[in-house]
């Protein structure tokens, strides 16, 4: 896992495949909170989180994940549960 202290607000998040996944709202413990606008039309009433263990590295203003974007999206967690929603 990369050092989450390097993750900053408004960084882009991309999958290992280079596909965009979202934008960082903030780091919350060992998870990255995405902005609500990146949660999809059906989920704009709450934030989604990405487990910090998926972060492969930080490249400039971009967080690169170790999983492809579609796989990472299946692992989104909600604030309430902390459990994957995919």
Image (tube, rainbow, N blue to C red):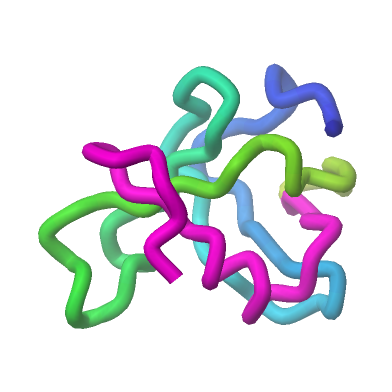
Q: Is residue 6 left or right of residue 10?
A: right
Considering the image in quadrants, where does the N terminus appear? top right
Q: Position of residue 24 (x, y in %)?
A: 51, 46
The answer to whether residue 83 is above or below residue 8 is below
Residue drawn 84% across the image and 79% down it: 17
Considering the image in quadrants, where does the C terminus appear? bottom left
The answer to whether residue 22 is above or below residue 20 is above
Residue drawn 47% across the image and 58% down it: 76
Residue closer to the observer: 10 or 48: 48
The answer to which quarter of the image holds residue 39 is bottom left
Q: Which residues are magenta?
A: 62-86
| View extreme (left): residue | 45
Q: Position of residue 69 (x, y in %)?
A: 68, 74
Q: Position of residue 80 (x, y in %)?
A: 23, 38
Residue drawn 65% across the image and 58% down it: 13
Question: How many numbered circles does the render carry?
Answer: 0
The answer to whether residue 71 is above or below residue 13 is below
The answer to which quarter of the image holds residue 3 is top right
Residue drawn 29% across the image and 40% down it: 81
Is residue 3 found inside the magenta-colored segment of the image?
A: no
Q: Position of residue 7 (x, y in %)?
A: 67, 32
Residue closer to the observer: 51 or 84: 84
């Amino acid at each position: 896992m990369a050092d989450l202290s390097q993750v900053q607000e408004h960084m882009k998040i991309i999958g290992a495949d280079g596909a965009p996944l979202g934008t960082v709202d903030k780091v919350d413990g060992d998870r990255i909170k995405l902005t609500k606008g990146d949660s999809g039309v059906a989920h704009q009433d709450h934030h989604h989180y990405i487990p910090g263990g998926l972060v492969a590295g930080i490249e400039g203003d971009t967080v690169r994940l170790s999983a492809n974007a579609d796989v990472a999206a299946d692992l989104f967690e909600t604030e309430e549960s902390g459990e994957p929603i995919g």
